[in-house]
């Protein structure tokens, strides 16, 4: 890839991965409730799931979606429906005044990896990245570069939001503030998901 293409890919990765979405919002909320140490399996699971999704599409899944467009739409709306359900659960979750993290652990590595299947934003990022930056003449080499930027790039993006969650934890130790926070996170997740459902 030329320098200008790499610069464009960098901007694409930052704009798509760091902006609010299911992965970043869930990391933010989870960090508030659980702390960042218990969040590492979730963070690494997101990156692994993203890489699997990226290579699956790069090796032909995107061709299947082009041949059977309804398959992509069904997957997108099923995933979007699940995320809206998850957002409602977050918004209505009971407030623990002691911030006790023992009851509801964060996502495991496998859960976070599998979560990418129902994450509409990850599909949009992956399919868009492959369409824009995969080079048919050097397919595997370009896929490795895309993996570095978009797959492994999820780690600093998710960690950034988790750190932001940690920084607000003391403020959210008050039950009423935590209640409002849960509601806000649920609403933001819905706002992040709904536009993805209208992507072509």
Image (tube, helix red, strand yellow):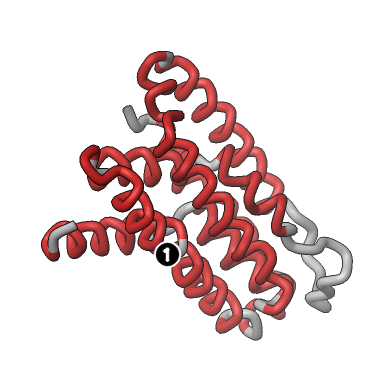
User: Residue 144, position in %: x, y?
Assistant: 37, 55
Q: Of helix, strand and loop, which one carries label 1?
A: loop
- 137 lies left or right of 53: left
Task: Write down the quadrant of residue 165 in the picture.
Answer: bottom right
Q: For label 1, count other residues whose C-alpha is less than 10 Å away and answer few (under 14), some (14-19) or many (20+).
A: some
Count of marks, rendered view: 1
Of residue 170 and residue 114, the one placed in the foreground of this image is 114
Which percent across, then down, holds residue 33?
71, 71
Residue at 57 percent across and 55 percent down: it is 48
Figure quadrant of residue 6: bottom left
- Work out whether 142 lies above or below 104: above
- The quadrant the C terminus occupies is top left
Q: Residue 168: x, y in percent?
A: 57, 80
Q: Residue shown at 57%/34% (left/top)? A: 79
Does 35 sit above or below residue 55? below
Point 37% across, 30% down: residue: 198
**Residue 147 location in percent, x, y?**
40, 55
In this figure, which residue is indicated by the disc labeled 1? 153
- Can see residue 177? no
Height in image: 71 above or below 145?
A: above
Q: What's the residue at 45%, 48% (across, down)?
A: 192
């Amino acid at each position: 890839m030329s320098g200008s293409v790499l610069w464009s890919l960098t901007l694409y990765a930052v704009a798509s991965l760091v902006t609010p979405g299911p992965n970043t919002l869930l990391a933010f909320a989870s960090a508030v409730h659980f702390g960042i140490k218990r969040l590492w399996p979730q963070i690494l699971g997101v990156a692994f799931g993203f890489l699997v999704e990226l290579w699956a599409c790069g090796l032909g899944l995107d061709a299947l979606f082009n041949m059977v467009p309804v398959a992509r739409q069904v997957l997108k709306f099923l995933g979007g429906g699940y995320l809206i359900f998850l957002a409602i659960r977050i918004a209505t979750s009971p407030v623990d005044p002691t911030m006790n993290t023992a009851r509801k652990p964060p996502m495991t590595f496998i859960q976070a990896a599998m979560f990418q299947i129902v994450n509409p934003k990850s599909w949009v990022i992956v399919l868009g990245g492959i369409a824009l930056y995969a080079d048919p003449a050097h397919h595997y080499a370009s896929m490795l570069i895309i993996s570095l930027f978009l797959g492994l790039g999820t780690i600093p993006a998710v960690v950034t939001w988790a750190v932001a969650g940690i920084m607000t934890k003391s403020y959210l130790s008050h039950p009423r503030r935590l209640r409002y926070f849960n509601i806000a996170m649920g609403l933001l997740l819905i706002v992040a998901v709904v536009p993805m459902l209208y992507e072509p």
